[in-house]
C-alpha cells in the first residue's frame, strides 16, 4: 500500500446492512472497503476473510491500532466460556410495546436520571428492555447466562480474547439490584472500560475498547463548539455536545465517557431506509436497486410542493413525541401526483422527521452531515434551505473513520497535569491537546474533577478577532489522593504541575515513591509551571531523587487565562475560560531529558541558560506589569487594561520597559531588537481590553515584589550598576509603597500588613539610590488626578 504513509489505524464499523473497513494513516489519508453485514454469528469469520483479501500481508503488518464500533443496544449473551447463548436481539428488533411500558413504569425518567446519571426518555427500547426480552425468549438458558456485550465487543473478543465494554454502548444498564432483578439474568454487566482504553493485542496491533456507532460517527464529523452532527444513515441521529442540565422532553442526554464529550441527541426511525421504501412505492421513480439513479431523480424533480405528503416514520416514531405504534407512509393515491411533487414530498418527509430534534438541541452554529444519505446532494441542499449552515462532512465512512481516529488517539503520548486551574485548563491542556497528546488531570477539588469527568473536557475562548471557542478534551480526571494517580504516573510520558508553588512540597511527598518506580523503566521529565521564584530547586530537594532518567524543568507562563463572561458561563459551564492568543511555553532546555518528545508539543521552547531567561522575563514583563498595576490602583482603575491604556501610565510603563531593556542588553548581551520587542509585546498584552484582569490581583504580595532581585529593585540596581536612567522604574517602586487596598483585600494578603509598617522610603536606603526625582514625578501624577 505505497500511497499510505507510516503506521496505519484500522477502523471497523459493524452496521446493520454493511460492514465498513477503513485504514487511516498518520497524515489523515484513508481507504475504505465494505461488505454486506452477515448474520452476527458468522461475522468474525467473514470479516477475517474480507480483510485477508483486501489487505496485503505487509499492509496488515503496518496496522498498529484497531478500533471497532457497531450498532448499539443489542442483547448478546455469553456463557462462562464466552460462547454465544441463544439468538442475538439487535437494535432493529422491536420488543412488545407492553415490555417498554413495564420498564417505564418500574424505572421512570426521574429514576434513570438519579441512578444512571443519564437522561433516557421513556417510550424507548433501552438495553434493559432488550435483555429482558432475551430472558423471556430463552428461559431455559437463563442459568447459563454470564455476561451481556454489544456487537463491537463480540469483535473485540475475537481480536484480543478479552470480554469488556463501555458505558456509552450500554446505556441504561448498571449494577443496580432492582434493575438486574427485573431483567432476570443476574449480574451480567461486563467489565467497563473507556472507549480509548487499550484492552489487548491482535497480531502486532493494539485493540481499543471502542464505542457505539453513534459516538464514533460524531467523532468522524469534527464537531466544534456549537456544531450539531447529523448521522444520516438507515436511521438518523442529530446530536450536539452539551453540558445542559435542562434536557427537553423526549431528548436523550449522556454524560462523558472517557474522551467522548457529554452529548444531547435523539434519533428517528426515518432515514435511508424510509427513503428507499418511499421510492419503491413511486411508479415513476427508478428501481431502488440503482441508488445513483434514485438520487439523481430526487435531485432533478425536487422543488415543487403539492397536496401529497410522505410520513417517513413508517415503523413507529422515535425521538421527541415517540409513538412506537405509529405507522407512516404515503398519503392516499400519491401516484396521482406529479413527479416533482412526489420527490419534494419524499425529501420533506425525511426533514420533517428531524425537525423536532432540531428544535430540541436548541441553539447551534451549523450542522455537519455524515453517513450514506450525506452523499445525496438533494438531502444537503434541502437541509441547507431549511436550517442554514448545513454542510456535508463525511459519507458512509463516517463511523469507521471516527473509530479509526479514536484508535489513533489511544496510542498518542500521555501527559498528566497536576492542577486543573486556569493555567492547567487554559494553557497546558490547550497546547497538549492541539499537539495530539492525551491529557489527564489531577486536582484536589472534587467539584472540578466531577465536572471534568461529567463533560469529558472544557471549553476555552480565544481572545482573538473574532473570538474562537474550542473544546479541549481529556482522557480522565481524578483526585490527588486517588489510587488512579499511581497508575497514571506509571503510564505518563510527561508530568506538568500548575498547582501553586506553596503546594509543591506536599505534592512531592505524595508522588516521590511513584516517580522513583516510574523512572526505573524509562526517562521522565517533570515540567513546573508555577509562580514561584525557584520551583525546580524546591522540587529537587523535596523529591531527593538522583537519577539520569529524571528531568525537573522550570518554565515561564506568558499567557493570560481569565474568568469567563456570564454568558460564557451559561453557555459552556463553570470550567470555561478566556485565554490570550499566546502559545509559547519557554522552559529550561538544559534540564530536559526527552528533548525530542518535548519539541513535539507546539509552543514549547527549550532555552539554554534559563536562569537568564527567567531574569529577562521578571525584569521586563513583570516590571512593566508592576508599574502599570500599582499606578493604576493609585489612579482608581479597576482593571489592568484600563490602567495600561491611560496615557500617563502607558508612557511610564513604556519607559520602564525601555530602561529595564537597556540594562539587560548592557549586562547580558541580549539582542537589542529582540529585547525591545519583548518590552513592546508586554505592554501590548496589558493594554488588550479583551483580557479582563482585576488590578487587585496584580497588586497582591507587594513586599515580595519590592525584594532585591524582583521586578522593580532588580532592574533599578542593574541600571545603577551601568549608570543608566531608571526614572520610571523608581516611580513604580514608590507606587508600591503607597498601595493601600480595601479591608477585604487586606485580610486576604498578609504582605499588605507588612507593607503598612514599612511605607517609608527608608526601605530603599541601603541601596544608595536617589528617589527624589521619582517622588516629584509621582506626586505630580497624583496631584493632576486630584485636581
Image: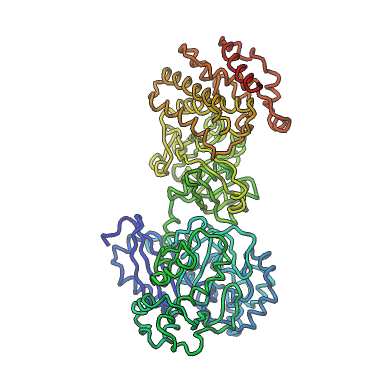
Q: Is residue 536 above or below residue 754?
A: below
The chosen color scheme is rainbow
Can you give x and y, in whole percent of width and height, for residue 311 in the image? 52, 81
Residue reaching furthest left? Answer: 2
Quadrant occupied by the N terminus:
bottom left
Q: Residue at the spot x=44%, y=62% of the render?
A: 220
**Quadrant in the rendering for residue 609:** top left
Corner quadrant of residue 395: bottom left
Q: Which image quarter holds the C terminus?
A: top right
Q: As displayed, is residue 727 above or below residue 127?
A: above
Q: Residue at x 54, y 65 (%)?
A: 166
Q: Is residue 722 left or right of residue 700?
A: left
Q: Position of residue 750 (x, y in %)?
A: 69, 28
> Which residue is depicted at the point 64% across and 81% down?
99
Q: Which residue is at a point 66% across and 79% down the rendered structure image?
A: 101
Expressed as whole percent of the image width and height from the top left, the position of residue 100 reads 63, 79
Q: Nearer the viewer, residue 11 or 275?
A: 275
Q: Residue 599's spot in the image, x, y percent?
A: 40, 41
Front one among 199 and 101 = 101
- Vertical position of residue 602 compared to residue 82: above or below: above
* Residue 78 appears in view: no
Amino acid at each position: 500500500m505505497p500511497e499510505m504513509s507510516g503506521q496505519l489505524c484500522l477502523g471497523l464499523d459493524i452496521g446493520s446492512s454493511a460492514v465498513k473497513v477503513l485504514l487511516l494513516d498518520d497524515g489523515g489519508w484513508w481507504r475504505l472497503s465494505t461488505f454486506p453485514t452477515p448474520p452476527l454469528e458468522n461475522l468474525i469469520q467473514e470479516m477475517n476473510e474480507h480483510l485477508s483479501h483486501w489487505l496485503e500481508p505487509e499492509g496488515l503488518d503496518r496496522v498498529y491500532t484497531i478500533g471497532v464500533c457497531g450498532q448499539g443496544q443489542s442483547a448478546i449473551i455469553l456463557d462462562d466460556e464466552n460462547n454465544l447463548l441463544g439468538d442475538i436481539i439487535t437494535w432493529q428488533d422491536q420488543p412488545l410495546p407492553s415490555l417498554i411500558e413495564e420498564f417505564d413504569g418500574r424505572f421512570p425518567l426521574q429514576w434513570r436520571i438519579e441512578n444512571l446519571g443519564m437522561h433516557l426518555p421513556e417510550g424507548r427500547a433501552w438495553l434493559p428492555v432488550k435483555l429482558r426480552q432475551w430472558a423471556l425468549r430463552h428461559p431455559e438458558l437463563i442459568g447459563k447466562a454470564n455476561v451481556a456485550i454489544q456487537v463491537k465487543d463480540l469483535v473485540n473478543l475475537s481480536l484480543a480474547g478479552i470480554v469488556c465494554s463501555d458505558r456509552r454502548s450500554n446505556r441504561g444498564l448498571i449494577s443496580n439490584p432492582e434493575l438486574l432483578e427485573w431483567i432476570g439474568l443476574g449480574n451480567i454487566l461486563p467489565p467497563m472500560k473507556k472507549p480509548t482504553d487499550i484492552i489487548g493485542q491482535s497480531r502486532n496491533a493494539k485493540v481499543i475498547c471502542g464505542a457505539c456507532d453513534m459516538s464514533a460517527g460524531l467523532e468522524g464529523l469534527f464537531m466544534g463548539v456549537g456544531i450539531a452532527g447529523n448521522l444520516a444513515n438507515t436511521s438518523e441521529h442529530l446530536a450536539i455536545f452539551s453540558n445542559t442540565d435542562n434536557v427537553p422532553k423526549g431528548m436523550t442526554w449522556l454524560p462523558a465517557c472517557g474522551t467522548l464529550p457529554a452529548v444531547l441527541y435523539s434519533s428517528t426511525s426515518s432515514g435511508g431506509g424510509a427513503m428507499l421504501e418511499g421510492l419503491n412505492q413511486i411508479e415513476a421513480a427508478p428501481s431502488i436497486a440503482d441508488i445513483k439513479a434514485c438520487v439523481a431523480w430526487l435531485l432533478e424533480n425536487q422543488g415543487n410542493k403539492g397536496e401529497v405528503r410522505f410520513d417517513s416514520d413508517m415503523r413507529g416514531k422515535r425521538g421527541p413525541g415517540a409513538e412506537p405504534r405509529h405507522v407512516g407512509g404515503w398519503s392516499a393515491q400519491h401516484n396521482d401526483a406529479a413527479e416533482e411533487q412526489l420527490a419534494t414530498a419524499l425529501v420533506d418527509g425525511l426533514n420533517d422527521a428531524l425537525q423536532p430534534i432540531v428544535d430540541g438541541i436548541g441553539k447551534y452554529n451549523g450542522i455537519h452531515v455524515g453517513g450514506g444519505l450525506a452523499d445525496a446532494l438533494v438531502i444537503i441542499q434541502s437541509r441547507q434551505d431549511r436550517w442554514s449552515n448545513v454542510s456535508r462532512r463525511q459519507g458512509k465512512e463516517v463511523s469507521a473513520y471516527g473509530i479509526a481516529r479514536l484508535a489513533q488517539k489511544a496510542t498518542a503520548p500521555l501527559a498528566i497535569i497536576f492542577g486543573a486551574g486556569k493555567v492547567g485548563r487554559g494553557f497546558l491542556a490547550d497546547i497538549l491537546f492541539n499537539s495530539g497528546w492525551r491529557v489527564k488531570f489531577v486536582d484536589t477539588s472534587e467539584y472540578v474533577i466531577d465536572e471534568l469527568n461529567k463533560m469529558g473536557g472544557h471549553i476555552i475562548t480565544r481572545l482573538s478577532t473574532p473570538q474562537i471557542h474550542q473544546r479541549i478534551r481529556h482522557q480522565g480526571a481524578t483526585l490527588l489522593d486517588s489510587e488512579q494517580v499511581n497508575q497514571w504516573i506509571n503510564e505518563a510520558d510527561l508530568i506538568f504541575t500548575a498547582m501553586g508553588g506553596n503546594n509543591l512540597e506536599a505534592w512531592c511527598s505524595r508522588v516521590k515513591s511513584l516517580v522513583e518506580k516510574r523512572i526505573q523503566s524509562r526517562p521522565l521529565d517533570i515540567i513546573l509551571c508555577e509562580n514561584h521564584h525557584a520551583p525546580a530547586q524546591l522540587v529537587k530537594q523535596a523529591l531527593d531523587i538522583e537519577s539520569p532518567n529524571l528531568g525537573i524543568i522550570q518554565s515561564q507562563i506568558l499567557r493570560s487565562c481569565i474568568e469567563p463572561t456570564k454568558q460564557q458561563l451559561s453557555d459552556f459551564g463553570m470550567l470555561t475560560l478566556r485565554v490570550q492568543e499566546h502559545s509559547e511555553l519557554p522552559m529550561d532546555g538544559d534540564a530536559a531529558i526527552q528533548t525530542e518528545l518535548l519539541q513535539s508539543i507546539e509552543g514549547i521552547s527549550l532555552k539554554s541558560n534559563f536562569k537568564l531567561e527567567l531574569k529577562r522575563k521578571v525584569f521586563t514583563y513583570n516590571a512593566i506589569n508592576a508599574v502599570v498595576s500599582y499606578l493604576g490602583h493609585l489612579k482608581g482603575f479597576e482593571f489592568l487594561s484600563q490602567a495600561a491604556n491611560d496615557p500617563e501610565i502607558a508612557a511610564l510603563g513604556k519607559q520602564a520597559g525601555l530602561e529595564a531593556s537597556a540594562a539587560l542588553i548592557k549586562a547580558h548581551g541580549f539582542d537589542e531588537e529582540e529585547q525591545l520587542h519583548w518590552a513592546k509585546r508586554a505592554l501590548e498584552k496589558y493594554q488588550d481590553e479583551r483580557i479582563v484582569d482585576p488590578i487587585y490581583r496584580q497588586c497582591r504580595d507587594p513586599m515580595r515584589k519590592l525584594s532585591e532581585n524582583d521586578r522593580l529593585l532588580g532592574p533599578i540596581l542593574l541600571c545603577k550598576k551601568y549608570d543608566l536612567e531608571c526614572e520610571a522604574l523608581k516611580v513604580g517602586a514608590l507606587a508600591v509603597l503607597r498601595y493601600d487596598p480595601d479591608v477585604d483585600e487586606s485580610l486576604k494578603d498578609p504582605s499588605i500588613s507588612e507593607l503598612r509598617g514599612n511605607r517609608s522610603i527608608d526601605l530603599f536606603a541601603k541601596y544608595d539610590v536617589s528617589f527624589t526625582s521619582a517622588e516629584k514625578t509621582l506626586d505630580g501624577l497624583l496631584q493632576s488626578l486630584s485636581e
